[in-house]
Amino acid sequence: MKRPKTLDKLSSLDSWGCKRYLDATELACSLPNMCKLYSRVFQQDRYLYTCSECPQKYPWIRNEFGFD
């Protein structure tokens, strides 16, 4: 590591900053829904962002829509 920085300086580093703003055509919806769902696979709460209503269960392989 050539020039280490302390944790409180990370947010001000240019290499860690994201200056890209999304164009309106790139946004999926104007107000996304944030869903906190328990995942049986990961055995913990996961956060899912969607433009639809929150599913009942965390979607995963063979349960893509979160119904099961």
Image: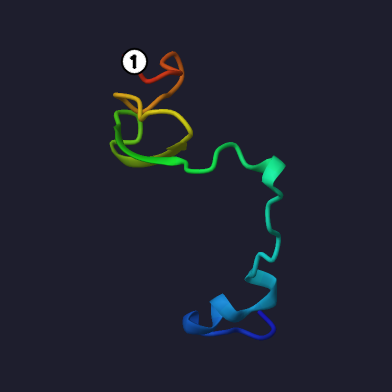
Look at label 1 and name its amino acid. Answer: Phe
**Residue at point 66% right, 64% down?**
18
Query: From the viewer's perspective, is residue 20 above or below residue 48?
Result: below
Q: In screen coordinates, is 14 left or right of 7?
A: right
**Residue at point 38% right, 28% down?**
53
- How many discs appear? 1
Q: Position of residue 21 (x, y in %)?
A: 68, 58
Q: How packed is label 1: few (under 14 Cα within 10 Å), some, or many (20 or more)?
A: few
Hey, which quadrant is residue 56 in on the image? Answer: top left
Q: Position of residue 7 (x, y in %)?
A: 48, 80
Query: From the viewer's perspective, is residue 66 above or below residue 34?
Result: above
Q: Tag 1, which secondary structure?
A: loop
**Residue at point 53% right, 43% down?**
30
Q: In screen coordinates, is 49 left or right of 19?
A: left
Report the residue marked by disc 1: 67
**Residue at point 57% right, 84% down?**
5
Query: From the viewer's perspective, is residue 45 above or below residue 61?
Result: below
Query: From the viewer's perspective, is residue 2 above or below residue 43?
Result: below
Q: Position of residue 1 (x, y in %)?
A: 66, 79
Q: How is the image coloured?
A: rainbow
Location of the C terminus (image quadrant): top left
Q: Nearer the viewer, residue 33 or 13?
A: 33
Q: Nearer the viewer, residue 11 or 49?
A: 49
